[in-house]
Amino acid sequence: MNNFTSFHFKEFCYQVIDELGFNKPTPIQEKVIPLINKKRDIIGISQTGTGKTHAFLLPIMNNINTAHDSVQAVITAPTRELASQIYQNAKLFMKYNPQLRVSLIVGGSDRNKAVQKLTTQPHLVIGTPGRIKDLSLEAQALKITTAKIFVVDEADMTLEFGYLEDIDAVAGKMADDLQMMVFSATIPQNLRPFLKKYMKNPETVEINSQLVTTANVEHILLATKHQERYRVLKDIMATIDPYICIIFANRRSEVSTITRRLREDGYKVGEIHGDLEPRERKQMMRRIQNMEYQYIVATDIAARGIDIDGVSHVINMELPMEPDFYIHRSGRCGRGSYTGVCYSMYDSNDEKNIAVLERKGIEFKNVVLKKGQFVDLGEREKRKKRIKQPTELEKQVQMIVRKPKKVKPGYKKKRKREVEQLVRKQKRALIREDIKRQKKERARQAQIAKRAMEED
């Protein structure tokens, strides 16, 4: 398929496509749009930047009946910023079809005003789970029972932020023949019971791009070992001179702590995490967009769909719990024709995640900071690749288990097992001898102590 003509959209949708400069559907659009038109339930697994938003917006907008004054589709996102970005994309459709009514329903705004605006119901609702639940179930101002389509965007983040109960409550009020679509970078195990509850034979569409991150990004690993990570962070910051650098931590409390310490050390630092009050978060995003900060400390919320222009560096205080989140984090820098660098602190517990990322095609450079300079350590797993030398005990046992004159198939494995068994036996014998020696020594010491007491 070279263009969008085979989808048979209405004219205003093609006007939107032309303004956006789309030449042909992305892989997820090519697979998802026909399924939506067939009213199938969908689980879409794809990374940021794959064209996912328009994969569901185009067919939803195309199928809305503007003659009906009722809610026909609901789209949720886990944060106000992500919901607002979907809403901004939806506004372009209203430009070419003024009869369309789309409402942004998010927290941090006046509740009474939001209720008043709902005297006329929108055709499409885009918002955060908590505020949609509040206005539909508590205030009963938003009539979602008429909706036939429900989209849960960034489902793994929705689960992570604890909004699944709100989603559950909203979905429970919708029609039995509801068409549900869930889009996510990953599908955590804890999300599966919810999917099973509401989705009918869903079609899973997974887009696995071989190029997981931009070629303009250099990926650097720094082994922390026993070093304090905040001190390593300060050493990195003293070495680089970023245009904008995002410092990622896995938990909100860590973001707050790092931000506080950096400010105490004289840095002007922005922060993004879920514990910020609505007004604080709005002000923070405005300041970030105005490029008031050289450094921004954030949780993964900033790596998922929020565009911050000019990011040249990323620093991971620790590798994310989900390997795919690394891709979203590193993807914040090196965009367009610019280059970027992603530094990641790690220890021995991260080896498994690093191996997963390497299999996905990411090439890490292993370095250490010495006197304000990054020194390349070469291959990270050189030690692991060294041939293990046999111990003196193993050498002695190998001399005992001699190679027979005539060997049979499987001889090497059999001889290896015999050597291992003998080594274990010899070790146990040595341990027993050592225990006997220690007992004798303790008895001798006790005898000496007894004599000393008698002489006194």
Image: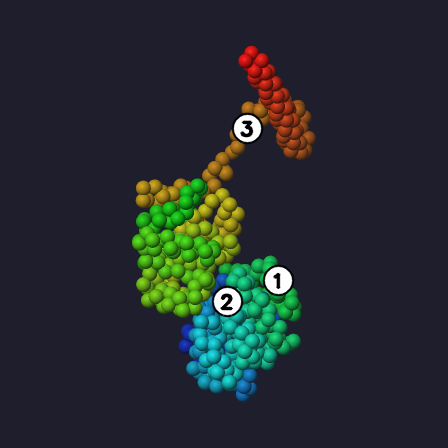
CA distance separating discs 3 and 2: 56 Å
Q: Which of marks 1 and 2 is nearer the N terminus?
A: 2
Q: How many labels does the image show?
A: 3
Q: Which of marks 3 and 2 is nearer the N terminus?
A: 2
Tell me which numbered mark, 1 or 3, is placed earlier along the sequence: 1
Residue 408 left/right relative to 323: right
Task: Give the vertical position of 388 relative to 185 (above or below).
Answer: above
* Vertical relation: 232 (above or below) 124: above
Amino acid bearing label 3: Pro
Q: Is residue 315 visible?
A: yes
Amino acid type at mark 2: Pro
Q: What element carries label 2?
A: loop
Task: Please provide percent x and percent y for residue 375.
Answer: 36, 42
Closer mark to the observer between disc 1 and disc 2: 2
Q: How crowded is mark 2: few (under 14 residues within 10 Å), some or many (20 or more)?
A: many
- Direction top: furthest residue: 455
- Which colour assignment does the render follow? rainbow
Spot the residue most to the bottom. Answer: 67
How far across and down, in percent of the image, does residue 224 sit?
A: 43, 44
Q: What element carries label 3?
A: loop
Determine which residue is flagged by label 2: 78
Q: In this figure, which residue is indicated by the disc labeled 3?
A: 390
Q: Quick one: label 1, few (<14), some, or many (20+) residues within 10 Å?
A: few
For mark 3, does the 10 Å Cα neighbourhood hold few (<14), some (14 to 19), or many (20 or more) residues? few
Q: Which type of secondary structure does the marked residue at label 1 adopt?
A: helix
Who is closer to the viewer here, 423 or 87?
87
- Seen at 48% across and 37% down, the residue is 383
Question: Amino acid under label 1?
Answer: Arg
Judge by depth and name the residue closer to the eye, 29 or 178: 178
Task: State the CA–CA distance, disc 1 to disc 3.
Answer: 48 Å
The residue that disc 1 covers is: 192
